[in-house]
Amino acid sequence: MKKTIKRLYKSDLFTDFFENEKSSGLILIGCTLISLLLANSIFSTQYLHTWHMKVGTESLEYWINDGLMTIFFLLIGLELEREIYIGELSKIKEALLPIFAALGGMIIPAGIYLFFNYGTATQSGAGIPMATDIAFALGVLSLLGNRVPLALKVFLTALAVIDDLGAILVIAIFYTKTIFWSNLAIAFGIMLFLFILNRMKVYKLLPYLIGGVIMWYFMLNSGVHATITGVLLAFVIPFEDGSKSSISYKLQHFLHKPVAFIILPIFALANTAIVLGSDIVETLSLDYSKGIILGLVLGKPLGIALFSFMAVSIGLCKLPKGLNWKKVIGVGFLGGIGFTMSIFVTLLAFNDHHIINNAKFIILLSSLTAGCIGFMLLKHNLKKK
């Protein structure tokens, strides 16, 4: 009986997560188009100034990327925690396929990027083509309607969540420059205190949220990217049995819509205000452009399909019912939709505004290409119901 209830809660939250993410993906497309149009219109100066105006000591764009996005990472952390405890990652045999797929989808694109950029000033962008945008990927998948089997939705969602975890680790390890150890120690001290509250079975959400805000402040001033706080906080919030009465479930359920329909669209508006120059052809020929394009459009599907095939071939796991290799390749192309996380890593990897602007444009172009190819492949291979 208990297992049946857990499966129901798992199914409810997965459906909720999928529906919100696919809707968010469609809204993100709209926000991106609006932002691009405004950035290249007669209102360009005013529009760009809006995101760069000072709020306190930093720009509005800074607080969006370091503040609001922490809440996005908190939701990702809660989703990952749920998958580990009672979801698709709870059984190692079932989890191995998306884990291997995600590893391939990170290693191969990073390798392709470094092939073109190793030893240059732009080699720090290797993390850009490693990311998958859950909202956009699920948004494109949703356009195929009811012909998409549940196994395919679950595989893409698990793959993207693991991919996000990989991106978070990459950000924490490779995009941290100067560390202020005292602030970092205080942040982890607060996390330890919250973990003790967890073990003492304190099931009130308020102490964790207050502790999370304080932990975010010290993490922000530690040199480690502040958004990491969201994931760390997710794993100290009590999961209990994962039922609808648990604070983890309530918080995750509450955050779905604000993140999907407010935070990510604001992030898209702020970070796709790209002024398109007349040197687009020249931009495409740059080494970091080649690394991003080939990493997302070819590296992602190649890595996801190749590592999945290896895992199945050596008997570590098997393809779920409803999946075949053509569908895995199609999902691999959807994994090449980098957008949110790719742009986020771009902001950390580069300091030159011109390079950042160009890289954002290349990410949009690559994500659009990968998404269209993935959509056409899946449409061809999925039977209408």
Image: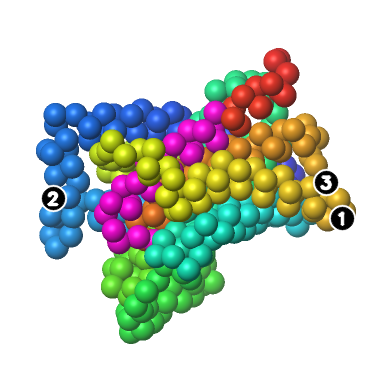
**Span of residues in magenta:** 349-372
User: Mark 1 sits on what residue?
Assistant: 314
Note whether residue 326 is visible: yes
Asked if the magenta segment contains residue 183, the reply would be: no
The image quadrant that residue 260 belongs to is: top left
Q: Residue furthest top?
A: 385
Amino acid at dot 1: Ile
Amino acid at dot 3: Lys
Q: Residue at x 33, y 53 (%)?
A: 355
Q: Is residue 138 left or right of residue 256?
A: right
Q: Residue at x 40, y 71 (%)?
A: 176
Amino acid at dot 2: Met
Q: Main secondary structure of the magenta part?
A: helix
Closest to the observer, 11 or 358 = 358
Asked if the magenta segment contains residue 366, the reply would be: yes
Q: Which mark is residue 140?
A: none
**First-in-chain label (2 vs 3):** 2
The image quadrant that residue 104 belongs to is: bottom right
Residue 138 x, y percent position in the rendering? 54, 34
User: Mark 3 sits on what residue?
Assistant: 318
What is the crowding at mark 3: few (fewer than 14 residues within 10 Å), some, or many (at least 20)?
some
**First-in-chain label (1 vs 2):** 2
Task: Measure how far apart labels 2 and 3 are at the Cα level.
Answer: 52 Å
Task: Measure how far apart labels 3 and 1 are at the Cα level.
Answer: 10 Å
Q: Is residue 328 left or right of residue 62?
A: right
Picture layout, residue 222 above or below residue 140: below
- Mark 3: secondary structure: loop
Q: Which mark is residue 53?
A: 2
What is the crowding at mark 2: few (fewer than 14 residues within 10 Å), some, or many (at least 20)?
few
Q: Residue at x 13, y 39 (%)?
A: 45
Residue 83 x, y percent position in the rendering? 62, 51
- Mark 2: secondary structure: loop
